[in-house]
Amino acid sequence: MAETTIKRMSKLTGVVTVPGDKSISHRAALLSLLCTAPLEVNNYAEGDDCARSLDAVRALGGTVEQEGNRVRLTPPVGGLKTSSETIDCGNSGTTLRLLTGLLAGAGISARLTGDASLRRRPMQRIVEPLRRMNATISAAPEGTPPLVTGPGEIIPIDYILPVASAQVKSALLLAGLASGVQVIVREKIVTRDHTERLLQHLGCACTTEEVTPETIVDPDDPRRKKKIRATDEYRTSVTLPARQMLVGGTVDVPGDFSTAANFIAAGLLIRGSHIILKGVGLNSTRTAFVTILKQMGAEIAIKNRTIVCGEPVGDIEVTYGPLKPRKISGDSIPAIIDEIPLLAVIASQNEGTTIIRDAEELRYKESDRIAAVVRNLKAMGVKIGEFPDGFAIEGGAELNGAEIDSFGDHRIAMAFTVAGAAAHGKTVISGSEAVTVSCPRFFTMVEGFRS
Ligand code: S3P
């Protein structure tokens, strides 16, 4: 296991370009398997997770030509090939869940697994709705990988997501696309919509409809009006009509917001910092971290907004400044799910107690991120209380360098590198190699700011 030592840093100033977005890169790679012509992807994400999606494309008969971060993906001649070898998705839940949907929908026999962390993660959430689509799919008895798919007569589905998960939504959309049946996925809480945007960009008639509230006369008080929704069961319906085709084309991947978030956090934690992040994905289903930080008083400006391949992109300018605490819970959680370890680190420096609830999903990520954050912030001298679905963090603590355990989780390793850069003394991250799944150059990028 690798160890990386971080020493306290003084103000961070400069311009950073973060690697390509992981979620969009996975989707581009996997969707290429269903395209009718080659797909050119620029700024494909670095790191092992997205490399696993490329390996899977090769295993299923696709051709991958890679030159740096430019990838040309040619769909398999004569359709998807059954893979006789197990597809190893490594640490990547997105590869495993999305690809299982695609293969189950296409009726391809395959076996998919991953590393020890991925083999502990819940898969029943995709197995259950895929079975409703009549797919042949099985999981280990605990509802975990390996997953095995096979031939099936796929039928349409109209499904309300019981867990707010973009991976589940996307698995079903890919199953519909691969089988040619209609899929409707309804969400109570909106999750990242990169699949829907990419499907549209590549020529698919995928649509999203919101259940907007209607204003009616209040039957209990006819002098008043009130807003009601036709249903409380869901807020949005995503529809993929039957028999959609994907043409090839070009996908320009924006910078990864979740990687950028580490530098936003560093800029807010280290006195005197001023950082500009160029060309970052600003999809609103991902950027609640910035919205919440601004509500806490952060000085963050978004500049040069534009739309690239259906995704909002722009530059983020961050200036150091003290923040106030906030309670974060409910519908905003899925939109900050990957940034919560960073929010917890930031909260330790706020002027008061920050509470984060309704985030039990954190326990099912690459590590149990609630336990990991509690353990590591305590080690750095922060007072933190643990709930089953979150934590309460007492602000104003002096962060002290400590022995940090990444628990093999890239987001924990990166968040506590940022904490280490703001802390007094020396911080040692054990299991620091975890960063290679999403940002292999992370430590070099951080050290690049040392003056
Ligand atoms: C992802 C969705 C989220 C997120 C993960 C990437 C995606 O997971 O945490 O890092 O690319 O769809 P869930 O859909 O399981 O919440």
Image (spheres, rainbow, N blue to C red):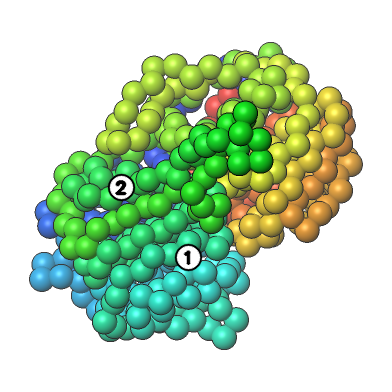
Between residue 415 and residue 96, name the one nearer to us. Answer: 96
Q: Are discs 2 and 1 less than 8 Å apart at CB? A: no
Q: Nearer the viewer, residue 335 or 377?
A: 335
Nearest to the observer: residue 375 or residue 184: 184
Image quarter of residue 40:
top left
What residue lies at 41% left-to-right and 58% top-to-bottom? 185
At a point 61% along the width and 34% down the height, the residue shown is 222
Mark linked to residue 90: 1
Q: Crowdedness of circle 2 by 10 Å Cα count: few (<14), some, many (20+)?
A: some
| Quarter of the rendering occupied by the N terminus | bottom right
Q: Look at the image and tell me in which quarter the C terminus lies.
A: top right
Residue 207 tag number = 2
Q: Position of residue 443 (x, y in %)?
A: 57, 38
Kind of element beneath mark 1? loop
Q: Secondary structure at mark 2?
A: strand
- Can residue 35 be seen? no
The spot of residue 396 in percent (x, y) is 86, 28
The amino acid pointed to by label 1 is Gly
User: Assess mark 1: CB under 8 A from ligand 1?
Assistant: no
Nearer-the-camera pick, 154 or 314:
154
> Can you tell me whether the CB of the residue at mark 2 lies under 8 Å from the nearest atom of ligand 1?
no
